[in-house]
Amino acid sequence: MEQIYTIPVNEAFDAAAADPALGCPLCALYNRLEDHELELILGASMMEPDVRIKTNREGFCRAHYDMMLARKNRLGMALTLQSHLDELRGETTVGAVFGDPAARAVQRINSLVGSCYVCRKVEYHFGRMVETIVFLWDSDENFPGKLAAQPCFCLPHYRLLLMEGRRRLSKKKYPDFVRACAGVVEPYFDKLRNDIDWFCKKFDYRYDGEPWYDSKDAVERAVKFLRSDLHAEPEKSKKPQNTTGIMKGGSTNESE
């Protein structure tokens, strides 16, 4: 297991254990990776020929176009879009009269559906981090305690952990890993249900004088639990202070 992934994983788990309001540590890892890739694509990587070839070919999803727009670097975006549009214009030209004149254009446009340079980069490194979580649980005597101290795992990332554990752990260890992850998720799930129930009751006049307890943000927390809390700009003060490799601007041997 590459050591460059163990540092950000440990930092995210330490941070979430110290501040439960941070929520799912895997969501935080995803968002940090995403933030890192967006900073690169609008900065240092923008003019690298090999990167430009890939962004011209893949483009970006709407979510990442919106996130780039929010960063107010219109020139950086314009330079990236300039070559992307130039390439697409040539590849979407309507063909000859004979045959299907739209075939080439449709094929190229189809290739952009579901294609995003940032998504591909983030998903690759995020997959390695999920592997690292299972690896650390299995090999680092301190990590099971860190995992048990997490405030929650959202359901999509809970699923990834269980699947990765099943793939990598022995039949003897896998049930223990499942119970460890469930020990984080199930109590949170039960409390969230109770908070949602109480939130609904607070709109009944009979409960008007009762306190809100932890239910005021229950709806928002439920959405994050059900569908993850992704594409959120990480607060600069909460980003890792001691990171290497992918979280520091370096690169790894990513399959292209």
Image (spheres, rainbow, N blue to C red):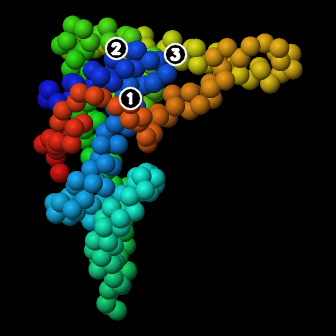
The numbered disc on residue 147 is 2
Q: Earlier in the sequence, mark 2 or mark 3?
A: 2
Q: CA distance from mark 3 to mark 1?
A: 23 Å
Placement of the N terminus among the 4 image quadrants: top left
**Residue 25 locus on image (x, y percent):** 38, 25
| Residue at x 71%, y 17% (from the top left corner) | 212
Q: Are marks 2 and 3 in contact (CB under 8 Å)?
A: no
**Residue 79 locus on image (x, y percent):** 31, 67
**Residue 132 locus on image (x, y percent):** 23, 25
* Residue type at numbered disc 3: Tyr
| Residue at x 31%, y 90% (from the top left corner) | 96
Q: CA distance from mark 1 to mark 2?
A: 19 Å
* Residue type at numbered disc 1: Lys
- The image quadrant of residue 253 is top left
Most distant residue in the right direction: 205
Q: Earlier in the sequence, mark 3 or mark 1?
A: 3
Q: Residues within 10 Å of mark 1 (few under 14, many from 20)?
A: few
Q: Is residue 19 left or right of residue 56?
A: right
Count of numbered labels shown in the rendering: 3
68 or 61, which is in the foreground? Answer: 68
What residue does disc 3 label?
188
Decide if residue 149 is in sight here: yes
Q: Is residue 206 left or right of residue 61?
A: right
**Residue 94 locus on image (x, y percent):** 35, 84
What residue does disc 1 label?
238
Most distant residue in the bottom direction: 97
Q: Which element is circle 3 on?
A: helix
* Residue type at numbered disc 2: Leu
- The image quadrant of residue 129 is top left
| Residue at x 83%, y 18% (from the top left corner) | 208
Q: Is residue 212 left or right of residue 11?
A: right
